[in-house]
Amino acid sequence: VQLQASGGGLVQAGGSLRLSCAASGRTFSRAGVAWFRQAPGKERDFVTGISWSGGVIYYVDSVKGRFTISRDNAKNTVYLQMNSLKPEDTAVYYCAASINYSGSYYYTGVGDFAYWGQGTQVTVSS
């Protein structure tokens, strides 16, 4: 599975962005997918994840109610709609995939995902 993240940019606080994670490879439709983010000088953190079917979704508390993850397996793409953005959302956002990820809270560490996109920068100005 190869992943390509896109859609980042510069936005004012309160604005919105939609990230896309386009995948190649037959196994993508059977893989759980997550978005991580990494701010300068900080570790890469899990943000949200979705099961292969889209039936199970998990968000960390800091983005709950503002971010929405979805997927279109026919297009081999996962989306992250980010609304009400805050300066603290500024980071490089990465998508990641794993056949073993269920979309839940479990196994959401960086090491739990075998496939990674290259990252897309999101900058939120105050």
Image (tube, helix red, strand yellow):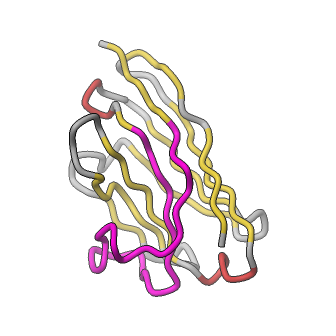
Q: Is the N terminus in the top left, top right, bottom left or bottom right quadrant? A: bottom right
Please check the rendered image and state whether residue 94 is part of the magenta-colored stretch, yes or no: yes
- Residue pushed farthest bottom? 100
Q: Is the C terminus in the top left, top right, bottom left or bottom right quadrant? A: top left
The residue sitting at 53% across, 70% down in the picture is 115
Residue 42 in the image, given as x and y percentages of width and height: 21, 43
The residue sitting at 52% across, 39% down in the picture is 120
User: On screen, 37 above or below 16?
Assistant: below
Question: How many tags in the picture?
Answer: 0
User: On screen, 126 above or below 97?
Assistant: above
User: On screen, 90 above or below 68?
Assistant: above
Residue 117 in the image, given as x and y percentages of width and height: 56, 56
The residue sitting at 28% across, 54% down in the picture is 45
Residue 125 in the image, given as x and y percentages of width and height: 35, 15
- Give the left or right position of residue 28, taking residue 95 as reference: right
The residue sitting at 41% across, 69% down in the picture is 57
User: On screen, 34 above or below 101?
Assistant: above
- Residue pushed farthest right? 74
Residue 94 in the image, given as x and y percentages of width and height: 47, 51
Residue 19 placement: quadrant: top right
Viewer-nearest residue: 83 or 34: 34
Please check the rendered image and state whether residue 42 is part of the magenta-colored stretch, yes or no: no
Residue 66 placement: quadrant: top left
Which range of residues does the magenta coloring cover? Answer: 92-120
